[in-house]
Amino acid sequence: MCILSGACTVSAQMPIKLRVLPEVPPDSADVAYYSKPHFWRAAGEVVGFNLGLWAFDRYVQRGDFAYISMNSVKENFRKGFKWDNDKLGTNMFLHPYNGSLYYNSARSNGFNYWQSALFSIGGSAMWELFMECEYPSTNDIIATPIGGTAIGEVFFRASDAIIDDRDTGASRFGREAAVFVISPMRGLTRIITGDAWRVRTTRGRLYGTPPVSVEFSVGTRGIYLNDEASSSAVGATAEINVEYGDRFEVTSTKPFDYFTVRADLGVVSRQPLLSQLNIKGRLIAREIYDVASRKMSVGLYQHFDYYDSDTIHKADPSHVSRVPYKLGIPASLGAGWMFRDASNPQWTLDTYLHGNVVMLGSILSDYYHVDERNYNLASGFSIKGGVNFVFNRDRFSASLSHEYYRLFTWKGYHRDTNLARSDPRTLDVQGDHSAASFNVSELRADLRIWNKLYLSAAVSHYHRSTRYRDYPHVKSNTTGVRVMLTYKL
């Protein structure tokens, strides 16, 4: 049975990269002006955002959790942090997005990456302990600030590339509106300070015009769950690939001078709006080799990974519908190695390898269904690798990538526990005692058919294997196929 859908994807580490604009270094006057830290303004924005969000939850949404009092605050401190049971999208994306707003409250007030991360921790702690009458969440205090730094820095860099303080009139208004949409706290800060309409002789960009490559694709995508019912979903897809910075430029020590992003937004019945998001940002790097068009570097990278799906309608009513996969990795850090060989005029080879520690992750559970949660919280490690071939410079490319996640759920529950009758507020478990593996493999090819227009085809495979302490071993396989037209800016 097929489901028609519309989607928008963002992908990363493009084999063929065409620069959007010529690279321009930042102006020293802009760096000096926008790098002055303003602690009280940043702290005020963090506190003000939390108060505003609480007021919306309390008086507009009338959420039960927003009816706070001194007694609820005392109870939060007395009971302490516990693992919560919110949806995957809430815990692994929306909370990190909130963390990005705390982060950019500081980032837009002159603080650097590391300093802004402390504001994200503070904003998250304030919310967990004071702004809800639910017990503070262990997973939220990890995912919100750490995932928030990755999302926040990407949005900060994206908004920086739009700002032009020399501009006036409708064009200036459009730029400032775009900044506000991409990075709301930066847009708010510019309104508070008057920088949103102040005309200066320089652009006002902290990072000038960096090397950025972008490509857009439209086409068809199919998802096939290889179970006994052979369930499937087929529909339209629109993709965008973005790569920011130079992956082999190592003279800079600023975090996220190089990063890639991948996301997937879908409009399909019973499927989540956001089905995929991957961020990989370089924190530090060192050059190992740079001789005769061959380059090699190593570095420390921050990773954010998110894969989500929901029940695909069963083709045969006699079979039980299944969820293909769920994975959330908001807090991950590790070493990365990159190599390029461009010595041959007819082809270029790029390859990379990453090994990461997963401080907090989550993966679909076949047995733990409590409140809104159907996944296990976990920690572990991941390994990612890939190779890109570009032939005849920019006429044809082929790429192969693989991601392996190994996640362990340590704090489980007794097998005789009746989950249906348990209080989700006090259960305080990560999920089922288990060890899970999740593999994502993708093969993609791009062929130039005219100017900057390419024909693209990709096949992805998702494999999950979970060994439970108290339940049978479960495996799941899902295949994705895409055929698209791609335009490279």
Image (spheres, rainbow, N blue to C red):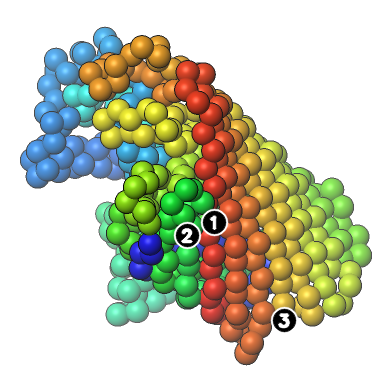
Q: Secondary structure under badge 1?
A: strand
The quadrant where residue 445 appears? bottom right
Residue 275 disc label? none
Nearer to us in this view, 283 or 35: 283
- Picture residue at 18% right of the left edge, 24% below the top: 133
Counting from the top left corner in percent of width and height, residue 177 is at 31, 67
Alpha carbon distance from label 2 to label 1: 6 Å
Task: Pick whichever, 295 or 42, lies toward us.
Answer: 295
Q: Position of residue 60 (x, y in %)?
A: 9, 45
Image side of residue 147 versus residue 463, left or right: left
- Identify the disc placed on residue 479: 1
Quadrant position of the C terminus in the picture:
bottom right
Which circle's residue, 2 or 3, is located before the other in the chain? 2
Q: Identify whether 175 is placed above or below 101.
A: below
Disc on the earlier residue, 2 or 1: 2
Q: Dot 3 surroundings within 10 Å: few (below 14), some, or many (20 or more)?
A: some
The residue indicated by pointer 2 is 223
